[in-house]
Image: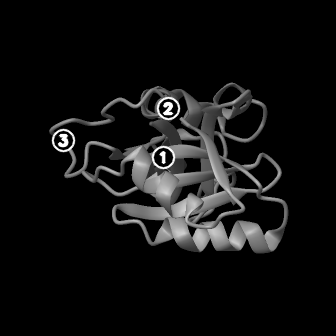
Amino acid sequence: MQYKCKVTVIDKKCFPEYQSQYLADPHSGVCPFYEIGDEFIFERYSGEDTFWLAGNGTQCGEAWDCISRYIYTALQGGSIMRGWTNDERMMIACCNDGTRPVIFKIERLDYKVVKIDGMVCEHCAAQIQRSLRAVSGVSDVNVRLDKKWAEVFVKKDMDVSDEQLRMAVEQFEKYSVNAID
């Protein structure tokens, strides 16, 4: 199993009474860095490591200090908040700006990488995507034609066997699975 982490901005708050009492600019307003609905996907597979690049302007430094440990835990396949949230693969966290906090939903995405020979065009990719999506326990499929693989995302508490994925691809004679990570 492989892991990605999806971070979604779900809310922004503003406390003008604290801003007027404590800030140099008493009219700072809400956080200008994030917007509700912003999504960020972090991954560490096959040479891609977006976790370490995130401090390069894609995240506010204060927010990154607050949420990076949870992202890192998710990328390692760990429980983000065992016993605290109703899904240990998810948590809600916020930055530490007391006058204009941003609230994040942090989710661990569990997936398998199915490496496929014979996939050469968008039609092939679409055919494989439809077939893999039909496998019980699969929540989504992202076919990477450029990499010759499919990322198969697994539903919570579901077991999707490598053999099920292999059969879904190899039902078409022109494709073969050369590895599943």
Choose the circle earlier in sequence order: 2 or 3: 2
Query: Is there any visible trace of residue 26 in the rendered image?
Result: no
Q: Residues within 10 Å of mark 2 (few under 14, many from 20)?
A: many
Residue that numbered label 3 is attached to: 84
Rounded to the nearest angstrom, the CA distance separating label 2 from label 1 is 11 Å
Residue found at x 22% / y 47%:
85
The residue nearer to you, when weighing 35 against 40, is: 40
In the image, is 166 to the left or to the right of 57?
Answer: left
Rounded to the nearest angstrom, the CA distance separating label 1 from label 3 is 23 Å
* Picture coordinates of residue 32, whole percent (x, y): 68, 55
Q: Return the mark for residue 2.
A: none
The residue nearer to you, when weighing 113 against 10, is: 113
* Picture coordinates of residue 81, whole percent (x, y): 27, 36
Q: Is residue 117 above or below residue 11?
A: above
The residue nearer to you, when weighing 159 against 24, is: 159
Count every numbered label the image shows and give the total. 3
Q: Which picture quadrant has residue 74?
A: top left
Q: Which picture quadrant has residue 180?
A: top right
Residue found at x 39% / y 44%:
93
Query: Is there any visible trace of residue 65 in the rendered image?
Result: yes
* Picture coordinates of residue 2, whole percent (x, y): 50, 36
Mark 2, secondary structure of its residue = helix
Residue that numbered label 2 is attached to: 75
Choose the circle earlier in sequence order: 1 or 3: 3
Q: Return the mark for residue 111.
A: 1
Q: Which picture quadrant has residue 173?
A: bottom right
The N terminus: image quadrant: top left
Q: Amino acid at mark 2?
A: Leu
